Amino acid sequence: MGIFDELKAKCENCTACSLYKTRTNCVFGTGNENADVLFVGEAPGEKEDLSGIPFVGAAGKLLDKFLYAVDIDRERVYIANILKCRPPKNRDPLPEEEEACLPFLREQVKIMQPKIIICLGRISAMKLIKPDFKITKEHGQWFKKGNYLMTAVYHPAALLRDPRKKEDMLIDMQNIKAKLDELSINN
Ligand code: URA
């Protein structure tokens, strides 16, 4: 078993917070384990919990459209979440759930060594970029943290609630694609 599969197996048996009691599946992540580009969302929703795959519900379908629009291949990037288990009724993650779950994401990053990390939404950006991240003001900006170049875009679920944000999302995604081209990251 590879190191990524070992971590996944550990995640599937995790009982570090109470969300294990209500999960159908642990949603570890999907895509290319050697990717240079890592997308990080918030937490699995219902469809993700049922399938074990991140971003397969309505928000995921919209994310796919934006990836397609800027010619980023979903199969060549990696997609994960801050939380690997679904919070009941999709409520925001609790701080203790984030702390319990973050070691998995940290290990994923350590193994993958992506060049670029893209936070999907405010919760992920506040956890990974800075605690006072303001998504409406700071989406699309680049932050250098250690070895990683990081940015955040609107969460696709926020675009479903407020379609006027889609224009900004397309610009951010186009800029991300331009950055990948500039760095010769092949997606
Ligand atoms: N929203 C997220 O943040 N992650 C998913 O996997 C699905 C919806």
Image (cartoon, rainbow, N blue to C red):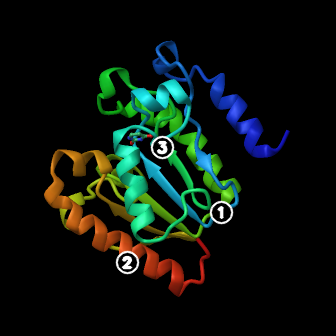
Q: CA distance from mark 1 to mark 3?
A: 16 Å
Which numbered disc, 1 or 3, marks the residue that appears first in the sequence?
A: 3
Which numbered disc, 3 or 2, marks the residue that appears first in the sequence?
A: 3
Q: Which residue is mark 1?
A: 113
The crowd level at tag 2 (other Cα within 10 Å; few <14, some 14-19, many 20+) is: some
The label nearer to you, 1 versus 3, is: 3
Q: CA distance from mark 1 to mark 2?
A: 22 Å
The residue under the point 26% across, 55% down is 132
CB of mark 3 near ligand 1 (< 8 Å)? yes
Ligand 1 shows up in the quarter that is top left
**Residue 115, placed above or below residue 42:** below
The crowd level at tag 3 (other Cα within 10 Å; few <14, some 14-19, many 20+) is: many
Q: Position of residue 61 (x, y in %)?
A: 39, 47
Q: Which residue is mark 2?
A: 175
Could you tell whether 41 is left or right of 78 in the image?
left
Contact check, label 1 and label 2, Cβ < 8 Å: no
Contact check, label 3 and label 2, Cβ < 8 Å: no
The crowd level at tag 1 (other Cα within 10 Å; few <14, some 14-19, many 20+) is: some
Tag 3 secondary structure: strand
Tag 2 secondary structure: helix
**Residue 138, placed above or below residue 12:** below
